[in-house]
Amino acid sequence: MSSHTQLSLVRQLSFCAGHRLYGHEGRCAFLHGHNYRVDIEVEAEGGGTAVDDVGRVVDFSLIKKRMLGWLDEHWDHAFILFEKDETTLAAVRTAEPTKYFVLPWNPTAENMARYLLEVVAPHVLAGLGVLARRVSLWETDEACAVATLVGRPTEPPVPVGSVVIVDGRTR
Ligand SMILES: [Zn+2]
């Protein structure tokens, strides 16, 4: 059966994080936070209507487990900061306990969506037979940035950055 249909799944995920926009001309230059929402859309690596024996592109729970697992560990309750934002990095390093993630780009919704699509998704979804096609990153209920993969990647994925957690408390 030939088909012109492209199947995909969308999973919603959420996390809380702080950031500031380096070089921003207004209030986004202040340290602040968001209840972020991520919508990640995935399709079968082969594209089209490819599904498994059960009829799924992939089980929703695997997308949640892999992607939300990464978000919880790396971005949730962390400050996400641009690597060139030296004064803020110095400030969060003086806090204790502290959790922060150094991004190679300014942490706008656009750049965070792009990072999740280009860097994080290929890493965490490896072996599932799926490709992340689109990531929408919602900063508020009204506004999101959308990163969409055009075509199929030919380059190997870039290594993912690491979170810094300093926490001397014994629990
Ligand atoms: Zn913000």
Image: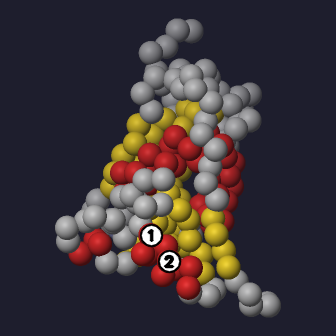
At a point 48% along the width and 81% down the height, the residue shown is 91
At a point 50% along the width and 57% down the height, the residue shown is 103
Pointer 2 with pointer 1, Cβ within 8 A: yes
Furthest residue toward top: 2
Q: Mark 2 is on which residue type? A: Ala
54 and 146: which is toward the camera: 146
Q: Give the CA separation, mark 2 to mark 1.
A: 6 Å
31 and 46: which is toward the camera: 31
The residue that label 1 is drawn on is: 86
At a point 20% along the width and 71% down the height, the residue shown is 26
122 and 28: which is toward the camera: 28
Say few, some or many: other residues with alpha carbon within 10 Å of mark 1 (under 14 / 14 to 19 / 20 or more): few
- Looking at the rendered image, the quarter that the C terminus falls into is bottom right
At a point 63% along the width and 65% down the height, the residue shown is 163
Q: Quadrant of residue 68?
A: bottom right
Q: Name the secondary structure under disc 1.
A: helix
Q: Name the secondary structure under disc 2.
A: helix
Give the colour scheme shown: secondary structure
Q: Mark 1 is on which residue type? A: Glu
Furthest residue toward bottom: 170
Residue at mark 2: C-beta within 8 A of ligand 1? no
Residue 26 position (above or below residue 148):
below
The residue that label 2 is drawn on is: 90
Percent position (x, y) of residue 14?
Answer: 51, 64
Say few, some or many: other residues with alpha carbon within 10 Å of mark 2 (under 14 / 14 to 19 / 20 or more): few
